[in-house]
Image (tube, helix red, strand yellow):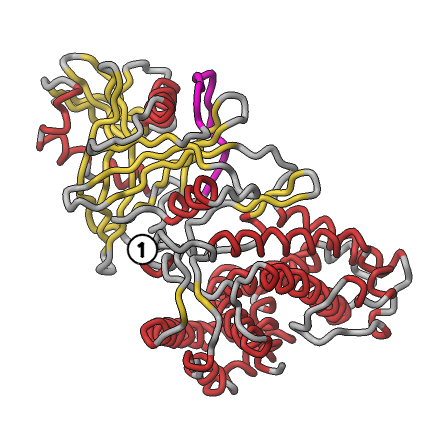
Amino acid sequence: MLKEPAINGLKTTYDFNESWEELLDNNNFVKIFLSDVLEAYIIKQRWFGGKSSTIKYIELAEYFKIQQFGEIYYGLLLEVNFVEAFYQHYFLPIAFVTDDTFSQEDRILSISIKNKKGYIIDAVNLESFRKLVFERITTALPKDTTKVQYHKSHFFTDIVYKSSRFMGLEQSNTSLVYNDEKYVLKFFRRIFADKNPDYEMSRFLSEKKEFKNTPSYLGSINLVDADNDYITIALMQEMVPNQGDAWEYMLKEFHTVFSNIELKSINVNMLPETELFQRLAIEAVPPQIIEWVGLDLFKKIQTLAKRTAEMHIALGSEFEETAFTPSRFNGDYTVWLKNRMIYQFQNRLNAVENNLHKLDGLALKLAHEILKNKNSIRKRFTTFDWTKLKGERIRVHGDYHLGQILVKDNDFYILDFEGEPESTIRDRKVKQPPLKDVASLLRSFHYAIYATIFNNKERFSNFTQDYLFKAGEIIYGYISGVFLGTYVTKTQHANLNTGYNQERIFILKYCLLEKAVYELGYELNSRPQWAIIPLKGISNIINH
């Protein structure tokens, strides 16, 4: 072994006589690679989801070659074991580079291979690697039976590699943009012993149902592991030119709405309110509200409701592929749901009790309201009589919020079907009432309204926060009503069975309460001043 001064934290250069093609068969290399050096590298990566836990050790669960015409890279499946007695799996592609000026900030290990000094790096930093995986997908055979399976959609023909770059900073995955913003390849970093829901849903909606308002599925990379399970490594899709996501779009819209209170001398206390969860046509929205909020915003809400309905209609219209055929409510689903919700609610109750000292004003009042009514809230979760429900369950988006929707030319495109980050891969694939996605999106509107208030305190300083909160709840009521009016009409015309009217209201309230409770834990732990948003959401349901 060669000892050298530290370069970018890599204190030792290890010497190996094996070739790069044989290196992963060397147990000594694997042992060195999996040492503290890899841990130090991983915990700095944005895609690593275990930052709040302590790594105990890292194992190499499996490795495979990503190669073409003698050019070889390795894909590693790393099992990260934590002191807290759980583990997670991550995908890391690696390459060996000898250029001392290259990728100085992203080196994992300094080594010498057959007297060639260099560094092990994350392969996505290399254009040659990005080009190789692109070409392996574009030249994939219709039926790939090898260990690393490349797939190409019939939409993806006669494509030649031109260029590639990183899309930008992401939390859980790494996305690469190809050929001047035409295609995007998403590498999944946190992986599961099953096909990724994003891959399954994107391919199904795009290839089988030709749903136009999602990026077209173009290809993928799946690994067949030692247990014969399919593991999704990467997903290739068309890049949708856009003006940003719906979250940023709605923040701008709501900023205008709140600014109008002063500009148009709106007396919020005199505005008519609507009953929550009441379906509304735009024609039924009072003129004072249209004057304040603007007709255009309500038309955009209608468009988004139509696209949401069309997504669910496509997902609910399959009768061959069992992973997507609609299901009825039954006892097994009810047991799964109740167990999940009781556990989550108890977890959030503990968080509320432990964080009361961080709250004040209305937030503190609402937190005490939840603690006082905890038994009745718990009963709402356990009172789920599936025998009275006539609607169907389908595969749903699972993590449907404004940040998962792109805005393009007054239309909306839905993406990122991975599902709820805290859920297991199995739970993400459970068929749910489509109103679960609707509830998630309504909660996202609620967030965008309150975020506008919190982010513009100086701009709206002429009004008390309570006054702005009241205005926000009025906006939320009408937006929810118009969205539901359009969504229900569209799904009914397509015979998507969401149940009778009272059933829809019951399920919507249930899912809204579930989502607000889910959000509460994050806010209490990360930004207590925002806990008012899920607390108000819970209060809206239990007092309705």
Q: Secondary structure at mark 1?
A: loop
**Residue 502 picture location, percent across and down:** 58, 79
Is residue 165 inside the magenta stretch?
yes
Question: Toward the viewer: 264 or 187?
Answer: 187
**In this orientation, which residue lies closer to the viewer: 370 or 271?**
271
Say whether residue 60 is magenta: no
Q: Which residues are magenta?
A: 156-170
Q: Quadrant of the C terminus?
A: bottom right
Whether 6 is drawn above or below 394: the answer is above
Image location of residue 248, percent across then percent down: 65, 47
Residue at screen point 26% across, 33% down: 149
The residue furthest right is 265
Three-letter code, disc 1: Ser
Q: Is residue 100 left or right of residue 111?
A: right
Q: Position of residue 20 (x, y in %)?
A: 17, 20
Looking at the image, which residue is at 57% across and 34% down?
240
User: Residue 103, can we see it?
Assistant: no
Crowd rating for badge 1 (residues with CA inside 10 Å; few <14, some 14–19, many 20+):
few
Q: Residue at x 38, y 57 (%)?
A: 428
Q: Which residue is mark 1?
A: 53
In the figure, is residue 144 to the left or right of 215?
A: left
Q: Can you give x and y, in whole percent of width and height, for residue 132 in the image?
A: 34, 21
Look at the picture and state if 380 lies above or below 498. Answer: below
- Eyeballing the image, is 486 above or below 241? below
> In this rendering, does residue 453 appear at all?
yes
**Viewed as shown, does residue 132 lie left or right of 446?**
left
